[in-house]
Amino acid sequence: MASSHSTDNCLGWAARDPSGVLSPYNFSRRVVGSDDVSLDIAYCGVCYADVIWTRNIHGTSKYPLVPGHEIVGIVKEVGSGVQRFKVGDPVGVGTYVNSCRECEYCNEGLEVQCSKGSVFTFDGIDVDGTVTKGGYSSYIVVHERYCYKIPENYPLASAAPLLCAGITVYTPMMRHNMNQPGKSLGVIGLGGLGHLAVKFGKAFGLKVTVFSTSISKKEEALNLLGADNFVISSDEKQMMALSKSFDFLINTASGDIPFDLYLSLLKTAGTLALVGFPSEVKFSPGSLNLGMKCIAGSITGGTKLTQELLEFCASRKIYPEIDIIPIQYVNEALERLIKKDVKYRFVIDIGGSLK
């Protein structure tokens, strides 16, 4: 197919400085290469990473910065060598858009752990030296390897949060065998990641308990999301009563938690998976050694597992709880995300509002 010439024909919303305030921004995308897919973006999920990078929390943000790495759209053009996609296909793009494609991790389909570092979907440096720009934009050009097939009949808006929030909890759940029916799972924190960990846990046949500091989340945890139990984590009596009762814990919270207390809730040889980023992880060696316990870290996931997750959610009819918003509301949405005032993931209607 003929490639369009690279001009400033992509409209996005960008932060210009560490205030993180986003506003319309025109820029160019690269010309479609032989292995590239160009997609018109329909929806983009709002992730806490969007707050961190637009506000330069890590100190490395490059402005203007176009965030967004839970991207779903429709293929509008494919390069001559593309085999997995055709024009009109629904397609997803997650947290990275490139990797070396040669190392042991890339070869396993675990590109997020690429030895040379994967190229982030936004604010990364791509092979041609340009800074990547994310999904708060009208279209994106991505090598087909980092694009995902959205299963037929799965709603596009619902697919978006699976590409970061979903895969972030699914990866450690699969890696540490948290998919054995009848086992017990504790989910710490009930936001974008936590609510999906609950849904996945129930789909796997686990007994799921939610740990939260907000009593206001109890009813939805039990009735909407289907958790079996809800515990206020600041209530020491409730916590102590659960000693040695969990096979698995997954910590999705970014606030600091008492690791020794949570490790005491694990059975012998239990695993605590950490996907949130607390300011520090502090525990006594005995909390691990005496019960042969593990603490394991994880970030998103490889292309192989991401595609598997999309198919799993489609076949089991698992849908994230989303709040669809226009792009014009995105600054307020980011403020609300900071205050944890979202049930449970904002998704921007790019196709319907970005003009």
Image (spheres, helix red, strand yellow):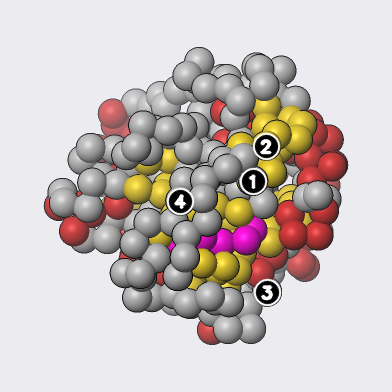
Real-space Cα separation, disc 2 to disc 4, in angstroms: 16 Å
Residue 312: image tag: none
Q: Are marks 1 and 2 in contact (CB under 8 Å)?
A: yes
Asked if residue 146 shows in the view, the reply is no
Comparing marks 3 and 1, which lies closer to the viewer? Answer: 1
User: Which disc, if any, is residue 155?
Assistant: 3
Viewer-closest of 320 and 283: 320
Q: Nearer the viewer, residue 328 or 294?
A: 328
Task: Provide residue 267's location: percent of width, then percent of height.
Answer: 38, 53
**Dot 3 or dot 4, earlier in sequence:** 4
For the question of whether residue 34 can be seen, the reply is yes
- Asked if disc 3 and disc 4 are in contact, CB closer than 8 Å, the reply is no
Q: Which residues are magenta?
A: 37-41
User: Is residue 222 inside the magenta stretch?
Assistant: no
The x, y position of residue 295, in whole percent, is 34, 41
**Mark 1–mark 4 CB contact (< 8 Å):** no
Inter-mark Cα distance, 3 to 1? 28 Å
Crowding around mark 1 (Cα neighbors within 10 Å: few <14, some 14 to 19, many 20+) is few
Task: Identify residue for label 4.
Answer: 31
In this view, 205 is above or below 60 = below
> Which residue is painted at 47% across and 77% down in the image?
86
Q: Viewer-nearest of labels 3 and 2?
A: 2
N-terminal-most mark, 3 or 1: 1
